[in-house]
Image (cartoon, rainbow, N blue to C red):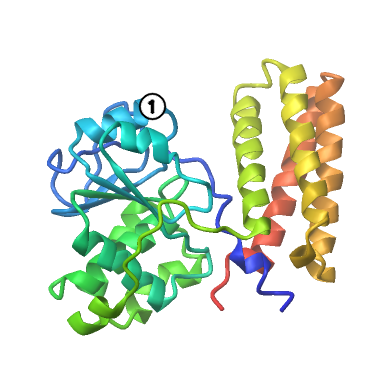
């Protein structure tokens, strides 16, 4: 199944603005604009908010201060379980992809929010696509008064990209469960789920891209350091080439092009040639977009 493996990628989103909120800080489904260690946070209901993944202790301190009790990650990255426990938070890891949320996984997510201590904070990486879609699925499963129209409006407010058809179309496609179906859904709620090797490597690529984008936006203040990040990006693409699930000809073509662009970016930064670095960055970003259009961002 050559096309399905890339569709398991659970990562690679764009940057996102800061927008924190606590369980009682704002009315449901609106943003708060004060500085925060968390981004794109929206309250979805009395017991549920969505937002970006917590990174570093400051974010977990904020989650604890805001009163959250359980964190549910739908991202592919390994959760920081020890930090969560340090601040009295339970972590649940139920990853989903950009091609949509299977109904079985939607029921698991809803059961976790129904049964575990709340309020619950649901997150992906940047809090714009998979996390909001998961939160919409949860509320649709648990709240019979919550309409598909309300869920669609929430996804728009969260910034969910309509190109992710499986996520953006979820409010209309999800068949709501009965109470008995929710009771039968798995309830082990792992703190760290097994993530496919391809998705794990793509999480690493996402991290390298975050650093490079921040440096590019700042005008490449330390091109030597950024060359090191570009080299790590290049090596990550090389590691992907070794994976069995990445051997399909169409996907390999995109990966080869991405590796070549990353090499150009690394060389330009190493030589502090910023015009060439900007051109290589743009080419590499465009190549990622072409690969995502074919393999990641479509509902199957």
Q: Does the rendering let one see residue 72?
A: yes
SS for callout 1: helix
Identity of the residue drawn at 71% across and 60% down: 291
Residue 169, placed above or below residue 135: below
Residue 272, placed above or below residue 96: above
Residue 20 percent across, percent down from the top left = 28, 36
Q: How many marks?
A: 1
Residue 216 vs residue 64: left or right? right
Between 269 and 184, which is closer to the camera in this rendering?
A: 184
Image quadrant where residue 52 sits: top left
Residue 296 vs residue 256: left or right? left
Image quadrant where residue 132 sits: bottom left
Residue 11 vs residue 44: left or right? right
How many C-alpha atoms fall within 10 Å of the one at disc 1: few (<14), some, or many (≥20)? some
Residue 271 percent across, percent down from the top left = 87, 20
Identity of the residue drawn at 77% across and 63% down: 246
Residue 7 percent across, percent down from the top left = 62, 68
The C terminus lies in quadrant: bottom right
Identity of the residue drawn at 70% across and 74% down: 3
The N terminus lies in quadrant: bottom right
Q: Which residue is identified by label 1? A: 57
Residue 286, placed above or below residue 20: below
Identity of the residue drawn at 67% across and 57% down: 197
Residue 17 vs residue 116: left or right? right
Residue 133 percent across, percent down from the top left = 37, 62
Residue 166, placed above or below residue 118: below
């Amino acid at each position: 199944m050559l096309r399905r493996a890339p569709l398991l990628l659970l990562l690679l989103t764009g940057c996102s603005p800061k927008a924190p909120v606590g369980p009682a800080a704002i009315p449901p489904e609106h943003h708060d604009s004060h500085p925060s260690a968390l981004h794109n946070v929206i309250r979805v209901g009395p017991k549920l908010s969505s937002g970006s993944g917590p990174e570093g202790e400051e974010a977990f301190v904020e989650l604890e201060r805001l009163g959250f009790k359980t964190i549910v990650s739908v991202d592919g990255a390994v959760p920081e379980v020890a930090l969560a426990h340090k601040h009295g938070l339970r972590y649940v890891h139920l990853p989903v992809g950009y091609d949509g949320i299977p109904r079985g996984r939607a029921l698991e997510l809803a059961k976790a929010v129904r049964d575990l201590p709340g309020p619950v904070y649901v997150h992906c990486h940047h809090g714009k696509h998979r996390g909001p879609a998961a939160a919409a699925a949860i509320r649709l499963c648990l709240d019979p008064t919550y309409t598909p129209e309300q869920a669609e409006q929430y996804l728009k407010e969260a910034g969910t990209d309509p190109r992710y058809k499986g996520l953006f179309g979820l409010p209309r496609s999800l068949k709501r469960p009965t109470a008995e179906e929710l009771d039968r859904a798995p309830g082990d709620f792992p703190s760290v789920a097994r993530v496919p090797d391809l998705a794990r490597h793509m999480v690493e690529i996402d991290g390298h891209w975050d650093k490079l984008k921040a440096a590019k936006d700042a005008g490449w203040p330390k091109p030597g350091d950024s060359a090191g990040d570009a080299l790590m990006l290049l090596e990550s693409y090389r590691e992907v080439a070794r994976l069995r699930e990445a051997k399909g000809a169409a996907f390999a073509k995109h990966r080869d092009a991405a590796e070549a662009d990353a090499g150009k970016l690394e060389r330009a930064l190493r030589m502090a040639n910023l015009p060439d670095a900007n051109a290589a960055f743009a080419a590499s970003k465009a190549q990622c977009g072409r690969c995502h259009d074919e393999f990641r961002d479509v509902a199957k």
